[in-house]
Image: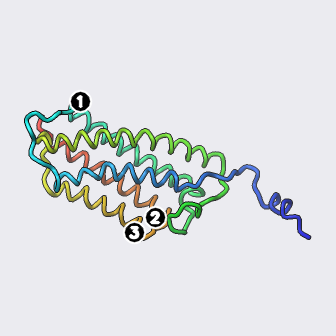
């Protein structure tokens, strides 16, 4: 009878460990992208400004700058996902929890942990600053053209299609990087329509 424990030991590289499901990092990163892309909603549901409406205390230019930095940081996260191919890219199964478990090197798991840490802080930054920018749009402080809203809307559709098509995690990582680059450009364009 074969000793499965010994057979397993022979097949394992002792410099690797079982990593948490990498989808637990990719999905929150996509959620941060979707938070920024939600600016597109202002084209359809914004209302005229009431004079007594509460306004943010921070300057709109600071919110725009912070959101741009957040988008740049998201590019860095998705580039890190590319770097740790054994953890994030070598999976051709659809995005589903429990499908992506693997043994990885210590350097790959460090990328996972640092990415989770960065994504958590970016979620806070993205939600706060996206909200302040949406308020500024509704109050007429930023007055972008429809084309810019459509750009944010296209990004939302790209994110939605990843889930509707049950795409692979590798595809999600590649598309996520493209979206982060596009959102950075869209946020930069918003600055041009800020009434100083």
Whole-percent x, y for residue 150 in the image: 20, 59
In the displayed structure image, the side of residue 5 where residue 59 appears, left or right = left
Q: Secondary structure at mark 2?
A: helix
Could you give the CA–CA distance between mark 1 and mark 2, rounded to whole angstroms? 38 Å
Q: Quadrant of the C terminus?
A: top left
Whole-percent x, y for residue 73 in the image: 40, 43
Q: Which quadrant of the view contains residue 160?
A: bottom left
Label located before the other in sequence (3 or 1): 1
Disc assigned to residue 164: 3
Residue contact between numbered discs 3 and 1, judged by CB atoms under 8 Å: no
In the displayed structure image, the side of residue 107 where residue 7 appears, left or right = right
Residue at numbered disc 1: 58
Specify few, some or many for label 2: CA neighbours under 10 Å numbering under 14, 14-19, or 20 or more. Answer: some
Label located before the other in sequence (1 or 2): 1
Q: Nearer the viewer, mark 1 or mark 2?
A: 1
Could you give the CA–CA distance between mark 3 and mark 1, rounded to whole angstroms? 38 Å
Q: Secondary structure at mark 1?
A: loop
Q: Which quadrant of the view contains residue 41?
A: bottom left
In the image, what residue occupies the spot 29% across and 52% down?
A: 37
Could you give the CA–CA distance between mark 2 and mark 3, rounded to whole angstroms? 13 Å
Q: Quadrant of the N terminus?
A: bottom right
In the image, what residue occupies the spot 14% across and 56% down?
A: 146
Whole-percent x, y for residue 33 in the image: 36, 51
Disc assigned to residue 171: 2
Label located before the other in sequence (2 or 3): 3
């Amino acid at each position: 009878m074969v000793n499965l424990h010994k057979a397993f030991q022979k097949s394992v590289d002792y410099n690797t460990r079982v990593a948490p499901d990498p989808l637990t990092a990719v999905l929150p990163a996509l959620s941060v992208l979707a938070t920024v892309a939600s600016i597109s909603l202002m084209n359809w549901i914004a209302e005229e400004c009431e004079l007594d409406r509460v306004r943010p205390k921070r300057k709109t230019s600071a919110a725009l700058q912070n959101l741009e930095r957040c988008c740049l940081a998201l590019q860095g996260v998705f580039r890190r996902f590319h770097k740790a191919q054994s953890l994030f890219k070598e999976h051709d199964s659809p995005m589903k929890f429990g499908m992506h478990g693997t043994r990885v090197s210590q350097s790959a798991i460090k990328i996972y942990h640092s990415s989770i840490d960065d994504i958590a802080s970016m979620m806070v930054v993205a939600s706060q600053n996206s909200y302040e920018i949406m308020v500024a749009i509704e109050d007429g402080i930023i007055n972008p053209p429809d084309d810019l809203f459509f750009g944010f809307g296209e990004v939302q559709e790209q994110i939605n299609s990843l889930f509707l098509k049950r795409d692979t995690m590798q595809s999600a990582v590649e598309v996520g990087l493209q979206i982060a680059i596009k959102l950075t450009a869209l946020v930069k364009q918003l600055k041009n329509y800020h009434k100083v």
